[in-house]
Image (cartoon, rainbow, N blue to C red):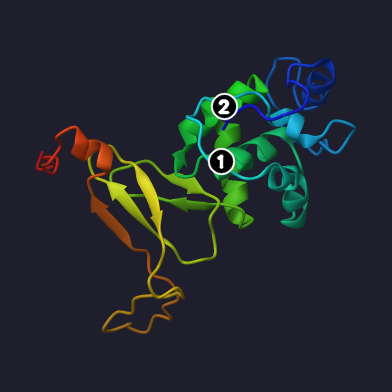
Amino acid sequence: MGELPGRRAGSPTAQSALAAQVGPSGAVHDHADSLSGDVPYLELLQIPPIFETMAGPSPEDREDIPAQLRAAGLRVTAARATILDLIRTHPHSDAEALARAARGRLGSVSTQAVYDTLHALVRAGLARRIVPADHPARFEARIGDNHHHLVCRNCGRVEDVDCVVGAAPCLTPDATRGYAVDEAEVTFWGLCPECLGQGVTDKPDISG
């Protein structure tokens, strides 16, 4: 994601907007202070993130993040708006990567605050948490379409793959044992193109 057009995030006006969210110690506080003042929300997103550049939401979608947070019943804070934008721009990132990128934008935010924010976004239905076996939890903003995932067993890269059926559950067990089945999570494992290009051919030895 490249730098967006407009004023730089280091401008006095943008710094003033961030100061409303940052306490004396530099820690970002998750309180009710709104970002809807005279500084456009996009201005808070113009510090280039740590991640590689990749396609993400349009500027219009990013400007709408505060409204989406409010519609989900969440207060608009710098941490919540920034982390939701990072999840949308860099899907399948884990909490530690999101925390590093959030600090690159906000200056200082605790790891616990990032985890709390992620949990709030998941509970509100704005993000989804996936946990590939033997890998840390990943977060994505693509929700509600019953898609599945491809996971590289060597490097852990995760990619979305559409569900062939399209509606949940796309698989049903032979015996439900009294359960009301409403969802099936499907994970495809293999080797990504980059690992194949590096000559990786074998499954990792996990026999211990």
Residue 71: image location, x then y, percent: 76, 56
* Residue type (three-letter) at the residue carrying disc 2: Pro
Q: Is residue 133 visible?
A: no
Given contact means CB atoms under 8 Å apart, are the residues at marks 1 and 2 in contact? yes
Residue 49: image location, x then y, percent: 57, 26
- Which numbered disc covers residue 89? 1
CA separation in Å, label 1 and label 2: 10 Å
Residue hosting label 2: 49
Residue 3: image location, x then y, percent: 64, 26
Q: Which quadrant does the C terminus fall into? A: top left
Q: Is residue 204 visible?
A: yes
Q: Is residue 179 above or below residue 162?
A: below
Residue 70 is left or right of residue 106, and the answer is: right
* Residue type (three-letter) at the residue carrying disc 1: Thr
Residue 41 is left or right of residue 93, and the answer is: right
Choose top left, top right, bottom left or bottom right for residue 47.
top right
- Please state which of residues 118 and 9 is positioned toward the viewer in this rendering: 9
Residue 113: image location, x then y, percent: 61, 33
Q: Is residue 148 above or below residue 154?
A: below
- Please state which of residues 149 and 205 is positioned toward the viewer in this rendering: 149
The disc, 1 or 2, on the residue closer to the chain's N-terminal end is 2
Direction right: furthest residue: 38
Mark 2: few, some, or many residues within 10 Å (few <14, many ≥20)?
Answer: many
Q: Residue at x 19, y 32 (%)?
A: 198
Q: Residue at x 14, y 34 (%)?
A: 199
Disc 2 element: loop
